[in-house]
């Protein structure tokens, strides 16, 4: 098995070990949900709070491995699979980071959760841009709309623009570090605007193709 597929398994293993180690040291009720102000607004039982993320990671691991095998465009997927598996590693590191932050909070450390998560979101968005720029037409990875799936030309043009926008989104997300009170704004607004623009742009390219034809 390639290293890119082993790294998530190692992270999952460490996540379970961390949960087992801290289990006796934590209260029976754990803070597990934070609001837009970065403060707690939801709690869960200790077992669920400690092991939800590791079990979720197990599910996602097998899902990420399974879906590409069912893709009718599997040959296209094979052309960028190294970027896809690298992105999986980024996602699992993010989940492990969130797992650790949850534990630290419940050990008594206090911080703005949105603010400390922003660098991790920035990395995910930026690497999503890298992945988007290399993704070939498929059913599971990338900007999948009826119009991008219509042709390689629309897919490639949309993804080149989307790649740049996701990278910009990642950079803008870092502003959460310096403006914690507006963290949610810098986190959600760029993502929302990027998604809306890409959706409209793909449709524009599709209509342009019909006009030319």
Image: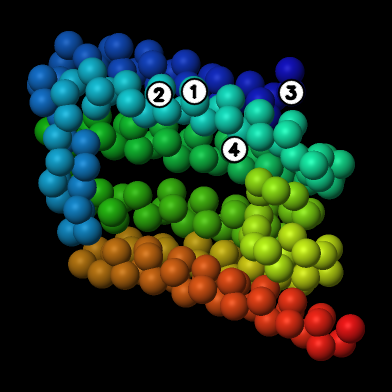
Which residue is denoted by mark 2 in the rendering?
A: 54
Of helix, strand and loop, which one carries label 2? Answer: helix
**Sequence-first disc among 3 and 1:** 3
Contact (Cβ within 8 Å) of mark 2 with mark 1: yes
Q: Left or right: 93 with respect to 107?
A: right
Tell me how far mark 2 sits from mark 4, CA to CA.
Answer: 15 Å
Tell me how far mark 3 sits from mark 1, CA to CA.
Answer: 18 Å
Q: Position of residue 205 (x, y in %)?
A: 73, 79
Q: Is residue 119 visible?
A: yes
Report the quarter where the N terminus lies.
top right
Tell me how far mark 1 sits from mark 4, CA to CA.
Answer: 12 Å
**Sequence-first disc among 3 and 4:** 3
**Sequence-first disc among 3 and 2:** 3
Q: Quadrant of residue 210?
A: bottom right
Of helix, strand and loop, which one carries label 1? Answer: helix
Which residue is denoted by mark 3 in the rendering?
A: 2
Which residue is denoted by mark 4 in the rendering?
A: 88
Q: Left or right: 143 with respect to 92?
A: right
Report the quarter where the C terminus lies.
bottom right
Q: Residues within 10 Å of mark 4 (few under 14, many from 20)?
A: many
Tell me how far mark 2 sits from mark 1, CA to CA.
Answer: 6 Å
**Sequence-first disc among 2 and 4:** 2
Which residue is denoted by mark 1 in the rendering?
A: 58
- Foreground mark, 3 or 1, reads 1
Q: Position of residue 101 (x, y in %)?
A: 29, 37
């Amino acid at each position: 098995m390639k290293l890119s597929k082993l790294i998530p398994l190692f992270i999952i293993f460490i996540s379970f070990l961390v949960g087992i180690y801290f289990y006796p040291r934590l209260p029976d009720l754990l803070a597990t949900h934070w609001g837009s102000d970065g403060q707690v607004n939801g709690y869960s039982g200790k077992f669920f709070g400690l092991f939800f993320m590791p079990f979720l990671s197990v599910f996602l691991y097998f899902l990420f491995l399974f879906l590409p095998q069912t893709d009718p465009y599997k040959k296209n997927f094979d052309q960028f699979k190294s970027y896809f598996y690298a992105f999986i590693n980024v996602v699992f590191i993010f989940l492990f980071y969130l797992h650790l932050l949850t534990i630290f909070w419940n050990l008594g450390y206090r911080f703005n959760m949105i603010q400390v998560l922003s660098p991790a979101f920035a990395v995910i968005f930026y690497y999503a841009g890298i992945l988007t720029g290399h993704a070939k037409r498929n059913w599971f990875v990338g900007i999948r709309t009826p119009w991008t799936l219509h042709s390689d030309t629309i897919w490639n043009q949309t993804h080149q623009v989307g790649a740049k926008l996701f990278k910009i989104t990642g950079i803008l997300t870092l502003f959460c570090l310096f403006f914690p009170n507006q963290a949610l704004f810098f986190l959600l607004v760029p993502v929302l605007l990027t998604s809306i623009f890409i959706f409209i742009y793909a449709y524009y390219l599709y209509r342009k193709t019909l006009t030319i034809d």
